[in-house]
Amino acid sequence: MSQKATDYLNISRAESLKNPKEKFLYRLLEILPGFLSWSTLIGAFLFSWLAPTGVAIFIILFDLYWLLKTAYLSFHQISSFKQMKKNIKTDWLEKLEHLGEWKRIYHIVVLPMYKEGKEIVRSSCQSLVDSKYPKEKIIIVLSAEERAGKKATQIAQELKKEFSGKFLKFFVTTHPQNLPGEVIGKGSNTAWAIKEAKEKIIKPLNLRYEDILVSTFDIDTKPYPQYFSCLTFHYLTTENPLKSSYQPIPIYNNNIWTAPNFSRVIATSNTFWQMMQQDRPEAMITYSSHATPFKVLNEVGYPKNIVPDDSRIFWKSYLFYNGDYKVVPLHYPVSMDAVLAKSLFRTAINQYKQQRRWAWGCVDIPFLLFGFIKNKKISLSKKLYYSWDILEGFLSWATVSLLIFFLGWLPLLLGGDNFNVTLLSYNLPVATRNLMTISMVGVLASCIISFLILPPKPKGIGKTKNLSLLLQWILLPFTLIFFGSIPAIDAQTRLIFGKYLGFWVTEKIRP
């Protein structure tokens, strides 16, 4: 595929386009997610006043839909959890022995770091040493940021000294600041690390691109012991492995015992969402820590001009390969940090900013829809499926929790006396309450699984902590609104007005 034919794959915003018509179209697509969300919320108020009876009927149907969807997702959550537990117990190295040529596979682990403390980076490196996979097949690329100052580079060099000799290579690089065409953040650092690994490791060692899997991790990511064996097995057994990315399940339990209640609820809820997605591979995209064949990264190019690089690399690959690209679920965990700062207030601020950064993934909507317009080789059915899936996903993120917890009361408050004397107005709160109560069964399932995935309790943690872990789920409505809908609306509104977010690095604190 020619460079000119794939220029649209490197778009980061409407301003990137030179053609005035294309720039206008892309700008409209940037406005679309926020327009849909605000139209939904404003429409809920407007029609509760103008057509309360119709809205009341819609509310009951809406709550029934979410009851069924909750049951559907809970089924996938339980199914995925069972598969994950099975995969944790599986001896993947033994399974590899039956495949013959598995030893030709090399793993590059990219660890982009900023100002994280030495112990956080060191614990991630140590987890790689502890993995049950031949270390002579693992290459570590620790990429510090020049803008982080000399301390970050010093930490990287100290860790290189400590861990050199424990892997095939422990390579340290420093990502220069202010390179043209880059957005500050994990994506540009990762892109630099991959380029450096190609020139200074892969070429000198004469490794085949097809034999290399690149795991791009957050700096706090600690894979479970058989991650590389499980990944290698799936790579060698999946159909069309060079047109696939590979996704583990992120479990935020590095510091789960010391994180505040709301942070644990958000972290665990995110784990459960990713767990559900593993059971629905047709709807999966890459998220946070994931693996990609080096051949793909070399052909497509890791995104360096966008904040949500983890999802964008999937969409770039999907468009580059004309729809012939997928994510393979590993049903195997990696451990990460829940949000934790030095104070409760600071933790809340950081949690909000992290959620807003994740919600900034809405910039993938104009990128994907514009890509579908430009790419004529992807089937219409695939375009319609993914267009609906991404639009519905971000619309739900921004609006559903607000609609569930407030929409049921709007017709009663705004509908007037004529509506409030009807039988429907009397039964509306009862119907919505009953439907939402039944849907809490899904929360109960999540509560139980959250206990089953907890790591061992550290010393100094009291027995009352278990009660706190149980009662924390009372905070779910609060977290869904204040750390779900509101940051999503914030991100989409910023995109409406072209106020593009930069990359915000989540502070890492370990007590």
Image: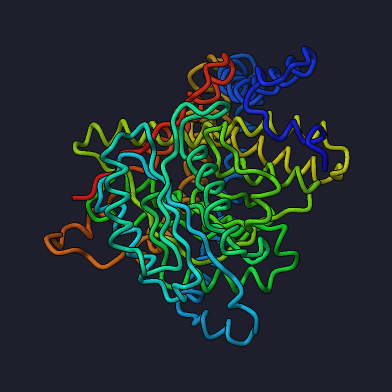
Residue 465 in picture, x, y percent from top left: 19, 57
Quarter of the picture containing the N terminus is top right
Q: Which of 227 and 57 is in front in this view?
A: 227
Residue 10 in picture, x, y percent from top left: 67, 32
Lateral position of residue 14 relative to residue 476, left or right = right
Residue 45 in picture, x, y percent from top left: 55, 18
Lateral position of residue 471 relative to residue 16, left or right = left
Residue 142 visible to an observer of this rendering: yes
At 36% from the left and 69% from the top, the residue drawn is 165
Query: Which residue appears farthest toward the front when viewing the image?
Result: 204
Q: Nearer the viewer, residue 467 or 154?
A: 154
Q: Nearer the viewer, residue 174 or 93?
A: 174
How many tags in the picture?
Answer: 0
Q: In this view, does 511 lie above or below 421?
A: below
Residue 428 visible to an observer of this rendering: no
The colour style of the image is: rainbow
At 61% from the left and 56% from the top, the residue drawn is 292
